[in-house]
């Protein structure tokens, strides 16, 4: 049988503190030594849950077709009106036996593209390098993305990145987590559910 403490307001409304039937040990709540108000967990802007994932497994793509990079994370929103704040940090390398090398990394929710410009939509590529007087272009960097998404669902959603080269010629390649387990090239993705 659960127990409860009821505080009756002057206008007839009640505040009820109720104990759970399954509690078997004392639960202590410490109040600050200052006046104030209680916050509602669902108040807009509050962070309700955080999920993070990482990978150090090297993944390579030599084609102009978007391919998974091996970095993904799943989260189940508690309300369809809440938003998901996504953070990505992903080491990459793009190389080509020419004076330029270009590639792209994009962020997706399930199969829906959220950021970036893959070649098959006619957009420009995000990552690359070009110079004159060289025979091989080779660049390394970190792809970073921050995106506030509105998935409008209470079903599980998966956020991931994909990559492709600009032109599958002259030994073009794009890699993520290059020598990850040796050089510590680890990629991270973090998602936060934010009350809407």
Image (cartoon, helix red, strand yellow):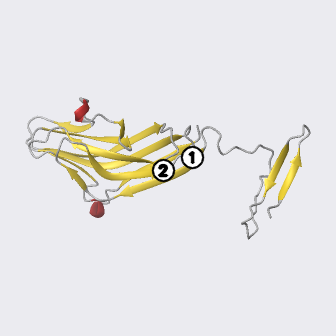
Which quadrant holds the C terminus?
Answer: top right
Determine whether 16 is above or below 165 in the image. below
Furthest residue to the top? 122
x and y, in percent, of residue 170 in the image: 8, 43
Q: Residue at x 11, y 44 (%)?
A: 136
Where residue 120 appears, as percent x and y from the top left, is 23, 34
Residue 124 visible here: no
Q: Nearest the camera: 56 or 75?
A: 75
Q: Residue furthest bottom?
A: 24
Q: Position of residue 5 (x, y in %)?
A: 85, 55
Secondary structure at numbered mark 2: strand
Q: Can the viewer see residue 140 in this picture?
A: yes
User: Which residue, as the protein is rendered here, is positioned at the far front?
Assistant: 1
Give the labeled residue for mark 2. 75
Circle 1 packing at 10 Å, graded few (<14), some (14-19), many (20+), is some
How far apart, in angstroms, are the residues tagged by discs 2 and 1? 10 Å
Vertical comparison of 183 with 37: above or below: below
Return the residue nearer the eye: 184 or 68. 68
Please name the residue that numbered disc 1 is placed on.
78
On the rendered structure, is 168 left or right of 189? left
* Residue for point 41% across, 48% down: 158
């Amino acid at each position: 049988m659960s127990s409860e403490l009821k505080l009756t307001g002057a206008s007839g409304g009640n505040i009820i503190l109720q104990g759970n039937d399954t509690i078997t040990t004392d639960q202590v709540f410490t109040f600050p030594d200052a006046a104030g108000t209680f916050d509602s967990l669902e108040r807009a802007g509050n962070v309700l849950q955080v999920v993070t994932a990482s990978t150090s497994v090297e993944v390579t793509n030599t084609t102009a077709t978007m391919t998974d990079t091996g970095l993904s994370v799943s989260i189940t929103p508690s309300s369809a009106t809440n938003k998901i704040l996504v953070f990505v940090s992903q080491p990459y390398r793009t190389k080509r036996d020419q004076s330029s090398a270009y590639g792209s990394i994009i962020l997706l929710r399930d199969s829906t593209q959220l950021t970036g410009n893959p070649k098959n939509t006619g957009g420009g590529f995000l990552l690359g390098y070009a110079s004159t007087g060289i025979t091989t272009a080779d660049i390394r960097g970190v792809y970073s993305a921050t995106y506030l998404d509105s998935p409008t669902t209470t079903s599980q959603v998966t956020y991931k990145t994909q990559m492709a080269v600009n032109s599958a010629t002259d030994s073009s390649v794009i890699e993520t987590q290059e020598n990850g387990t040796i050089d510590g090239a680890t990629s991270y993705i973090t998602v936060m559910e934010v009350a809407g």
